[in-house]
């Protein structure tokens, strides 16, 4: 397969990754944290939720409150990519007046305020929207969409704007419909663990809310301090608890969605079982805001685990990694909550750029195994038996186990901070693919051989337990020629294994034309038909998810 | 709300429940087992998978091999219910010849052979199809549907024909498209536990297959000896492992589906994570064969638990049942695999009609708690702590724990054989609803008060852990007047709690007009639009799932 995309479009793979996606904790004031990242990374190289370094971090960075003062200007998406504006109406003064009647005092037109919502988190996409609306209720969302539908105005639904594929910001002048003020918990059932809330609730806030009631959210993300639950559902977020609690397609019990014409679709049941007709809510999970605007979510929360253990292990080869995973599933069974891997080059970069020391002897691969269960003693015993088995059989050559929370966090840092280490190594080309586990690392090996000395490093890491590989290539500087060597090679390789070219990030604006590598033409056609059925004027998050029409 | 349905339509609630849905084990010859039920129940009152009583059961019943010899004739659906045939073509000799070219030697027109597939498992619905087709491949299914679509011939996809709402048999003369010969396992990945197979694989066979490889299927049903995995997915089957492993919307990873016009939609990926476009397979999970014919399934199998424990407990009230459930979730956490309840009247009927003794002292409610985990010792200890807690606090007044498999089966029998006990008590009106757990039993109490002496028994039992109530009413003989007292009362009551009028059985033919009690008009309208999009001629499983058009 040969890529026909111009170089500018391919630059999507080159991503600035200097912003660790930690919990923002005290730094929740919208937007500023992404503008002051580099400094903050220096001041606060590692910080978890509720870390006491928060306040000083805020003070240290407060002088950099303007976007332009600490990061370069982001090129307009319409200039960087070959994309044509569709014939939507342009927002007029009359429109603004109408919006002011629907959401009085919550119509934002100040360019500086809009800046934060026009630029994506990675600072690689920039829209030029002139208006942002902040509804508080589904009824307001409904009135806004009914109006926009009639007027043929395009709308960009936006949650925490933490997406990685340019899906959460306008491409041109789409109206930004923010869920930020729809942040109320509607109900929580402490028997069933079912939470119902508005779409704009921040994930970290919800986590705290249910943890105080002895439950946990079934998903956890690096971006939890900013991301909205509605956005999580709209993008079918994966994250750190996926291995244990599975997909949002299983844990989301109900949704309220406002359709493109303003119709409120109430599928907000709080039932584990409901076989009355087609399960419509599923359509909107992972639809990236292109089929409707999610306004409320009902989600099943599992009980909070009482014990958490983390082991960090060294493996001599990828075959041993796979065998360790099999053994782990069998012996840890119901308490296994994470099985992450990283290769030797990852560790090398983490050591070199972050000065973190490996807790185990040098190995070809490293594993992070986490257990979460209801009994400290039982879990430690299970983990002990597992470690004895894998060390005794030579599957694992060295290992360490965290016995307290700070050591556990230190072990997690080795895995979580890889992105940061990579960005310290030069330009980074990023891929996020799903593959059958037994072929997972072959792509890294093949690409490494293909690139040879053209790349500084070709590294593989990720959620092995989910079959999710993060493949990253570092180079001195961005090169279009090198990109041609990697694309469509990586996509075609992935397609050859019936893999997914986007495991958890979605397609958004930047990957939409790669859809065909993971889905056959009849599936793409049906997607287009569904879009036409639900949003006949195409006003909802245009230029996203579906490929450019020929 | 007032019911406008004629009496004949309402008789749907009166169900003959004399056929226990055990694993058929050795009795897998199609159809005979459902015709010899009453006798078999006498000969083999309780039998699990692989029980040695199988062969003698077969011999004892073999004299009753004809349908008419042991059960009354089933009235034609078109005579019993006010339903009009839609203007589909009638199968001609030319059509049969065409089918013979597509599936040579696998076109069934013999009336006796067709009988089994024209009548539903509960023997309350009967079609008059003149032809059954047995494709072996998706390509054959595609050719059949392309032909039927062109000729405007209606098609009734059929798996194991174990559905409970008349969804799996023709209403008129629809062509029966059987998945019975599509019974091959395509692949099993012993690292990831991902199974890929054709739609006609029998669930019990798949269970054995993966258990031999130290995994379990994520679903288990009473009908496992007959039901097909394709049918399970098409009806979004719940069953006994739902509490632990969740919905098929989470565990099904990929589907191959043939659309109404013969297009093969290949979404048969074996990936845990795939965020490339809309998750199309979700549309077909629970669509009851009305949007496409599922031809292959990819499903995630969890590791096989090494230890299983069963406790049977007595509770003084429903408030204590709920508190016990909360305590149980907290203390058993990840090893809890079932939390079932039954009321005192259930136990009374089980004792009276089946002569089973209660293993605990008389109580207002009884609970069955099952654990499944990876360590015998740990699980027993956790269960012990839980029991100490609930007995000590008075939430539970008496209890027993099964220490071996036969005792565990005996405890499960008290719960699983309720249906049998009910049918021994007279005519049974059956409802299967989802409700918020805290209101679950109020419906039973309210209906009991409403019916007073008109009913022999009003009983409640079911999957409390899933919020799924089985509400049953026994009477001396069927009464249309009594039905009027219950319907739409039960549906309206359920709707008032935002419950589901069909938790796990689906809508099929018999409940389709009750859809509006669980879904608002915009949702029903969208369902109809999806049907029109995917099956514009309406040839796939007509008269099912969607309400009769006004």
Image: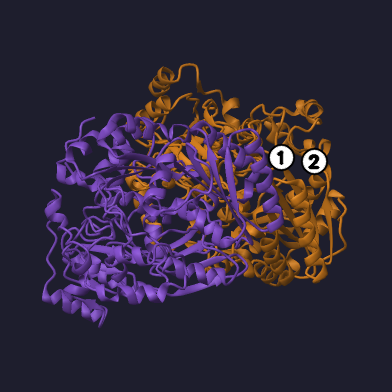
Chain colours: A purple, B orange
Give SS at disc 2. Answer: loop
Q: Quadrant of residue B399?
A: bottom right
Q: Left or right: where does residue A442 sit relative to residue A475?
A: right
Q: Left or right: where does residue B361 sit relative to residue A364?
A: right
Q: Position of residue A206 (x, y in %)?
A: 48, 69
Q: In this view, does B401 lie above or below A213?
A: above
In the picture of the structure, the residue carrying the numbered disc 1 is: B22
User: Which residue corresponds to the image point at 22% horizontal and 66% vertical from the top-left?
Assistant: A70
Earlier-in-chain disc, 1 versus 2: 1
> Disc 1 sits on a residue from what chain?
B
- Label 1, residues with CA under 10 Å away: few <14, some 14-19, many ≥20: some
The foreground one among A7 and A416 is A416
Task: Kindly check if marks 1 and 2 are in contact, taking CB atoms under 8 A apart as contact.
Answer: yes
Q: Quadrant of residue A182?
A: bottom left
Q: Left or right: where does residue A172 sit relative to residue B270?
A: left
Q: Position of residue A325 (x, y in %)?
A: 56, 39
Q: Position of residue B255 (x, y in %)?
A: 44, 38
Q: Is residue A490 above or below residue A68?
A: above
Q: Quadrant of residue A180?
A: bottom left
The foreground one among A519 and B374 is B374
In this orientation, does residue B372 appear? yes
User: Which residue corresponds to the image point at 19% horizontal and 74% vertical from the top-left?
Assistant: A112
Give SS at disc 1. Answer: loop
In the picture of the structure, the residue carrying the numbered disc 2 is: B46
In this orientation, does residue B500 appear? no
Q: Left or right: where does residue B231 sit relative to residue A231?
A: right
């Amino acid at each position: 397969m040969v890529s026909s995309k111009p170089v500018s479009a391919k630059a999507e793979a080159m991503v600035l990754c200097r912003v660790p996606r930690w919990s923002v904790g005290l730094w929740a004031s919208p937007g500023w944290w992404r503008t002051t990242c580099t400094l903050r990374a220096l001041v606060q190289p590692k910080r978890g939720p509720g870390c006491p370094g928060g306040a000083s971090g805020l003070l240290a960075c407060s002088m950099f409150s303007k976007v332009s003062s600490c990061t370069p200007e982001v090129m307009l998406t319409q200039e960087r990519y070959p994309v044509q504006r569709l014939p939507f109406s342009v927002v007029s003064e009359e429109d603004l007046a109408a919006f002011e009647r629907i959401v009085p005092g919550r119509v934002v037109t100040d360019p500086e305020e809009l800046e934060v919502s026009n630029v994506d988190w990675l600072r690689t996409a920039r829209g030029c929207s002139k208006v942002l609306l902040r509804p508080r209720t589904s009824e307001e969302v409904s009135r806004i969409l009914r109006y926009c539908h009639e007027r043929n105005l395009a709308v960009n639904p936006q949650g925490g704007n933490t997406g990685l594929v340019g899906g959460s910001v306008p491409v041109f002048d789409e109206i930004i419909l923010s869920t930020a003020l729809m942040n109320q918990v509607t109900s929580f059932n402490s028997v069933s663990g079912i939470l119902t809330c508005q779409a704009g609730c921040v994930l970290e806030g919800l986590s705290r809310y249910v943890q105080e009631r002895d439950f946990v959210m079934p998903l956890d993300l690096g971006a939890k301090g900013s991301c909205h639950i509605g956005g999580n559902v709209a993008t079918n977020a994966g994250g750190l608890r996926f291995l244990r609690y599975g997909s949002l397609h299983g844990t989301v019990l109900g949704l309220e969605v406002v359709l493109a014409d303003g119709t409120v679709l109430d599928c907000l049941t709080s039932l584990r079982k409901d076989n009355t007709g087609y399960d419509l809510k599923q359509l909107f999970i992972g639809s990236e805001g292109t089929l409707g605007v999610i306004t409320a979510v009902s989600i099943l929360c599992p009980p909070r685990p009482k014990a958490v253990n983390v082991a960090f292990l060294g493996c001599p080869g990828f075959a041993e990694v796979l065998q360790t995973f099999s053994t782990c599933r069998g012996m840890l069974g119901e308490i296994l909550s994470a099985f992450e891997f990283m290769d030797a080059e990852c560790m090398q970069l983490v050591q070199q750029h972050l000065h973190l020391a490996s807790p185990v002897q040098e190995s070809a691969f490293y594993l992070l195994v986490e257990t979460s269960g209801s009994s400290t003693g039982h879990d430690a015993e299970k983990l002990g038996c597992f470690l004895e088995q894998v060390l005794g059989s030579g599957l694992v050559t060295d290992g360490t186990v965290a016995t307290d929370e700070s050591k556990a966090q230190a072990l997690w840092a080795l895995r979580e901070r890889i992105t940061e280490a990579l960005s310290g190594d030069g330009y980074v080309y990023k891929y996020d693919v799903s593959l059958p586990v037994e072929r997972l690392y072959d792509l890294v090996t093949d690409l490494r051989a293909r690139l040879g000395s053209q790349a500084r490093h070709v590294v593989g890491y990720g959620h092995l337990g989910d079959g999710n590989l993060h493949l990253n290539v570092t180079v001195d500087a961005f090169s279009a020629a090198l990109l041609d060597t990697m694309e469509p090679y990586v996509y075609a390789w992935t397609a050859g294994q019936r893999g997914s070219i986007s495991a958890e990030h979605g397609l958004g604006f930047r990957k939409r034309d790669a859809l065909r590598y993971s889905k056959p033409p009849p599936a793409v056609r049906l997607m287009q038909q569904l879009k036409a059925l639900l949003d006949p004027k195409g006003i909802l998050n245009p230029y996203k998810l579906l490929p450019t029409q020929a």
